[in-house]
Image (cartoon, rainbow, N blue to C red):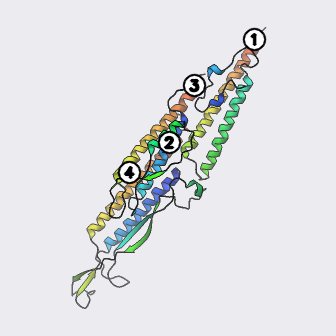
Amino acid sequence: MSNVSLGAIPNSYLPEPSSIDAGGDGDGLNFGSVLKNAIHNVDQMNSSAGAQVNSLLQGGGGDMTSVMIAVEKADVSFQLMMQVRNKIVSAYQDIEKMQF
Amino acid sequence: MGMFSMMQVSASALAAERQRAEVTAVNLANAETTHTDQGGPYVRKEVVFSATHGSLFHAAFNSAGSMAQAPAGSVRLTDVVDDPTPAVRRYEPGNPDADATGYVSYPAINPVTEMVDLMGSVRSYQLNASAISAEKQMIEQSISILKPS
Amino acid sequence: MASPPGIDVLQGYLKVLTDRQQVIVSNMANVDTPGYHTKDIDFQTAMRQVISSGGDVQLQPASMELQGLPERPDGNNVNIDRESLMLSQAQLQFQLGVQLVKGQFSQIITAIKEA
């Protein structure tokens, strides 16, 4: 699903509200996809940051400032993912509690 | 080049200026030396600096962890040469180092010139020491990006 | 989205500053090297590139020799006062850049936590 574009990171870490389709059809807000996107993003940032840190530690060329920024981006991505996960879990639990 | 290589460049300047100051100090100490082991008066020494060539920005290709190579822009003392100025001769017939005509050869060293040289070394040293402080500060600030602000 | 300079632009800014610092440091190291000429980079042009490309471009810095500085008898034209001034300026600009980056990240983290 491509409605929630977490790939808009790094300039905007928050999903554009208008792009979340909360409509009634099957293409609506899909918790699983949102989380998958977030995890994928974190993974990418992590490996990129990891590679840069390795290169820096080996004494090679890494512009140190860029490495720091990459590491911080990965960290923030991770925090975003954790928040998304928490919200999803909490929403699921709310739905479970509903009695019919 | 990277921030750590920058410190190497400044450090090379500190080392070079210190060596230059040492040579000046030896000149000063021997301003009146008329008799050395090699015979004849002390000869004034001068230093020659030269810069390491290469692009300042493409060291990444040849570094790959080899810190042994001086980064482009470093300076080093390549030579200590004799000053060709002829010795100063003074008439001192009673001096054991006097030649047949009673003249003694003294090193062509002007203490004022040496002091000015020394002050120049000190000023350059301070300049590069302040560069190292600035570089250190930059590294610390970069690291602070990771700390919660 | 229109926002204060994004993190990528700031990253480019800090990189250009680091490159400039390298040149200044080399000038300072060679203040007594005969024949050495002061070098610098075109900061304005580099920053224009950074801003127009949104910080994505991998910049190729080019150092050029500065014109108009008087040469001493040994061929060296490095001016201690100028280099000191440039160093202080670069330091402050770098500090500014880092503070802005930290501010951006801090904003994002707050937004994440408050959601």
Tell me how far mark 1 sits from mark 2, CA to CA.
53 Å
Q: Do the dots labelled 3 and 1 sit on one chain?
A: no
Q: Amino acid at mark 1?
A: Met
- Helix, strand or loop at mark 1: loop
Residue position marked by numbered label 3 in the rendering: C111
Q: Do the dots labelled 1 and 2 sit on one chain?
A: no
Tell me how far mark 3 sits from mark 2, CA to CA.
25 Å
Residue position marked by numbered label 4 in the rendering: C83
Q: Amino acid at mark 2?
A: Leu
Residue position marked by numbered label 1 in the rendering: A98
Q: Residues within 10 Å of mark 3 (few under 14, many from 20)?
A: few
Query: In front here: C87 or C54?
Result: C54
Chain to which mark 4 belongs: C
Chain to which mark 2 belongs: C
Q: Which mark is residue C14?
A: 2
Q: Amino acid at mark 4?
A: Glu
- Helix, strand or loop at mark 4: helix
Tell me how far mark 3 sits from mark 4, CA to CA.
42 Å
x and y percentages locating residue A55 in the rendered image:
62, 49
- Camera-near label (3 vs 4) is 4
x and y percentages locating residue C82 in the rendered image:
35, 50
For this view, does C42 lie left or right of residue A86? left
